[in-house]
Image (cartoon, grey):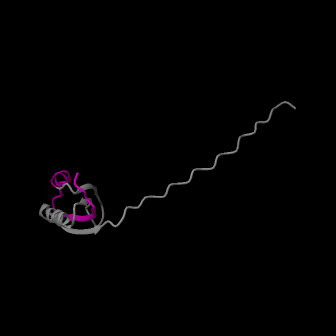
């Protein structure tokens, strides 16, 4: 398996015709996942590249596929929520007898 240490997020707008994400992902092994968005960008892609050369090649491929605006941001580190501490055990329930 080829190491892919360079991770990036690409937010892009497509032209009049939407980009075919499945076709794009099949052509570019660096594409890990994508989100179709409503807002400033039409699509957000998560990339894992072998290095800067592959990242530039993917950006060039996106432009050829019809992307009109691209914003590439390098991922510095992945954040994950801290594990929540386990709740302390509940004290045992005391059951009172109905008998006096």
Q: Residue furthest top?
A: 99
Q: Position of residue 1 (x, y in %)?
A: 23, 51
Q: Is residue 97 above or below residue 21?
A: above
Q: Position of residue 24 (x, y in %)?
A: 17, 55
Q: Residue furthest left?
A: 64
Q: Residue at x 13, y 60 (%)?
A: 65
Q: Is residue 6 left or right of residue 82?
A: left
Q: Quadrant of residue 53?
A: bottom left
Q: Is residue 15 visible?
A: no
Q: Position of residue 89 (x, y in %)?
A: 64, 46
Q: State the extent of the magenta-drawn residues as a range.
A: 1-27
Q: Residue furthest right?
A: 100
Q: Quadrant of the C terminus?
A: top right
Q: Position of residue 67 (x, y in %)?
A: 17, 64
Q: Is residue 37 visible?
A: yes
Q: Residue at x 30, y 64 (%)?
A: 39
Q: Quadrant of residue 77?
A: bottom left
Q: Is residue 20 magenta?
A: yes
In front: 21, or 28? Answer: 28
Q: Is residue 98 magenta?
A: no
In front: 19, or 16? Answer: 19
Q: Is residue 67 left or right of residue 89?
A: left
């Amino acid at each position: 398996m080829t190491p892919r240490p360079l991770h990036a997020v690409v937010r892009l707008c497509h032209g009049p015709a939407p980009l075919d994400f499945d076709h794009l992902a099949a052509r570019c092994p660096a594409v890990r996942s994508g989100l179709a968005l409503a807002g400033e960008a039409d699509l957000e892609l998560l990339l894992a590249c072998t290095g800067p050369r592959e990242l530039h090649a993917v950006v060039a491929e996106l432009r050829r596929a019809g992307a009109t605006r691209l914003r590439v941001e390098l991922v510095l580190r992945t954040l994950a929520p801290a594990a929540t501490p386990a709740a302390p055990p509940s004290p045992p329930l005391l059951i009172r007898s109905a008998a006096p």
